[in-house]
Image: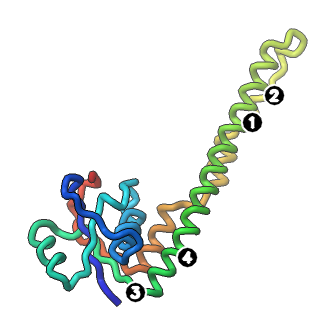
Amino acid sequence: MMKYLVFKNDRTSGKSNVPGSPEDIACEIACFVEGDGNPKTAFIAYPSETPEATFATLKLVPRFAITLDAVRMNVWLKQARPLIREIEKVAEIVNNAYADISEAMEDLARKIKFSPSFEHVDLMSEVNVDAAFDDMGSPSKYDFSHYVSDYFKVKLMDYSYDGTA
C-alpha cells in the first residue's frame, strides 16, 4: 500500500495530477472528505516517499495523508463514487419534492383566497410541510464522508487550512 500526501495546490502553480492516476484519486478523495466543495484541482498529491513529496513538505504542511492500493482505488471508482452520486440524487429529489409541494400549497392558498365562495375556508393552517421534511431527512454526504475517511485511512495533517483554494 502506498501513502499519498495531499497538499493545497496553488492555482498559479500549473501543477496537476494525471487524470485517473492514484495521485488524482487521492485528490478526489481528499476533496470529498474535506467537504468544502473545492475541485480536485485545488489539491496536488505525491507518493509520500518521493522527492516531490519531500520538496512539497518543505514548503507546506500536507493537508491529508491517504493510503491507496489497487483494491482501494477500485472501491473508490466502482463503489464510493456511485454511492456519492446516489446520495446527491436523493438529496436533489427531496429538495425538488419540497419545492414542488410548497409551490402547490401556495397555489392552493392563493386560489382559495381569490375564490369568492370559499375565501373563508382554512385548509392550510394544519399543514406543515417543513415539519414533514425535517422529520424525513435525507442521506448525508457529510455522514458518508466519515465512512470514506475511515476506509481510505485519511489522516488530516494540516489543521490550520482555511478551506480556500
Q: Which residue is mark 4?
A: 78
Kindly check if marks 3 and 2 are in contact, taking CB atoms under 8 A apart as contact: no
Residue occupying the point 14% across, 80% down:
51
* 114 over 80 or under it: above or below: above
Q: Which residue is mark 1?
A: 127
Question: Please, what is the three-letter code of the amino acid marked with disc 1?
Answer: Val
Q: Is residue 20 above or below residue 134?
A: below
Mark 1 in CB contact with mark 2 (< 8 angstroms): yes
Q: Position of residue 144 (x, y in %)?
A: 51, 68
Pointer 4 with pointer 1, Cβ within 8 A = no
From this view, report whether residue 131 is shown above or below residue 20: above
Please name the amino acid that badge 2 sits on: Leu
SS class of the residue under badge 2?
A: loop
- Residue 91: x and y in percent read 60, 53
Residue at 30% in and 58% down: 42
CA gap, disc 1 to disc 2? 8 Å
Pointer 3: residues within 10 angstroms few (<14), some, or many (20+)?
Answer: few
Q: Quote the CA–CA distance across marks 3 and 1.
A: 52 Å
Q: Position of residue 161 (x, y in %)?
A: 23, 59
Upstream in sequence: badge 4 or badge 1: 4
Label 4 residue SS: helix
Which mark is nearer the camera, 2 or 4?
Answer: 4
The CA distance from mark 3 to mark 2 is 59 Å
Q: In x, y percent, where is residue 106?
A: 71, 27
In this view of the protein, which residue sits in the foreground, 154 or 19?
A: 19
Residue identifier under label 2: 123
Q: Amino acid at mark 4?
A: Lys
The CA distance from mark 2 to mark 4 is: 48 Å
Pointer 3 residue = 69
